[in-house]
Image (tube, helix red, strand yellow):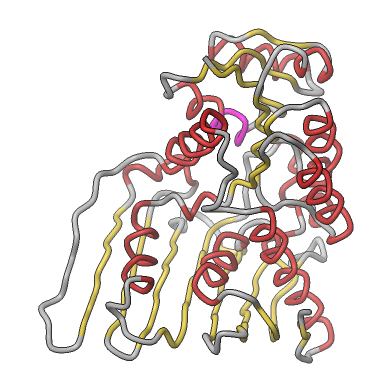
Amino acid sequence: MVKVGICGCGFIGKIHGKAWRSLSDAAVEGCYDVSPAAAQSLAGELGARPFGSFERMLAAVDVVSVCVPTSFHRQYAIAALEAGKHVLCEKPIALSLEDASAMLAAAAAAKTHFMVGLTHRFYTENVLVHDAAASGRLGTVLSCSAYRLGVTPDWSAGGWMADGSKSGGAATDFIMHDIDLCNWIGGQPKLVMAQGIKSASGAWDYMDISIHYASGVKGFVEGGWLFKGQWPFTQEHRILGTKGAAQWVSRMAKNIEKRMSADSTVGIYIEGEEADLPAWQRRDPFEREMEYFLQCVISGKRPSVVTPLDAYRALQVSLAAKQSAETLSPVPID
């Protein structure tokens, strides 16, 4: 039985904890948070033990889910790796390339596994769209488009998500998944152009990003959390090829906790063929993500669906988009 510790017991920590608890080969052993009350509460929900220090929890577990605010990812992920633990870190990997590089170096030096939770690579719907392109059904891929539109998160402790200095704003946190979906198809990003809208806090909380890839694929990302009221969490992943296109469209309630009851449609449209509207088994993508990472831990095989470099590249594009929006000029990526 693989013993798991949850580091950070807020909104996303609860999602991680429940996903880990659903797996028969894993047990949530402990919970840690700088707020003892938060650790106590989540531990009670999961049948785990609350720990008063991160170091004591590390000594009791094999795997750590790092679910703290992004500005603390480097601190906790590296400490866990250096303690010989496997680490699943929430996205984005970090707020700066300096921190991300330090995390990649620690992961490369570790004998354990490190993966960043780019969860949309584990949505069955996104996999269907991706595989339609990867199999050649769409012909030569021309572009990948993704958008994510929502309200400003109101669930983070102390409102840290709405503070761009702590979350990176929507450009780094919210649409990181969409940037990654385009990277998943396009490969190595080479040039980024973007414009955006800043919120009252000064964060880039709405962005329209164009990405040119070395492969020739064009990426288009739109998204942000400036919508108001009961605006539904809305997202799309669309790939255009010379023979056809594949698309996933999803609309749900205000926040992602309604993800399993979202109005979702996958369509694959090939020239000269009837539209293919595949059915799929609904399953929480966080459960699929944790299950995949768990199997990597058990088998000793390093994660390949999401690599540390994938997480680094997504951050590169996000930061380049902000720079482009500030200067109204293209930004190359090495």
With respect to residue 188, does 250 lie above or below?
above
The majority secondary structure of the magenta stretch comes to: helix
In percent of the image, x 19 and y 60: which residue is there? 278
The percent position of residue 173, horizontal first and vertical second, equals 67, 56
In the picture provided, is 59 more to the left or to the right than 228? right
Q: For residue 241, what is the image quadrant?
A: bottom left
Image coords of residue 236 (percent x, y): 42, 67
Expressed as whole percent of the image width and height from the top left, the position of residue 177 reads 56, 60
Seen in the picture, residue 226 relative to 36 is either above or below; the reply is below
Give how far across and how far down residue 69 sits, in percent: 76, 41
Q: Residue furthest left?
A: 274
- Which residue occupies the foreground of this view, 210 or 80? 80
Magenta part of the protein: which range?
11-16
- Asked if the magenta segment contains residue 13, the reply would be yes
For residue 279, above or below residue 160: below
Residue beneath the point at 22% across and 79% down:
269
Tell whether 319 sits left or right of 148: right
Quadrant of the rendering where the C terminus is positioned: bottom right
Which picture quadrant has residue 6? top right
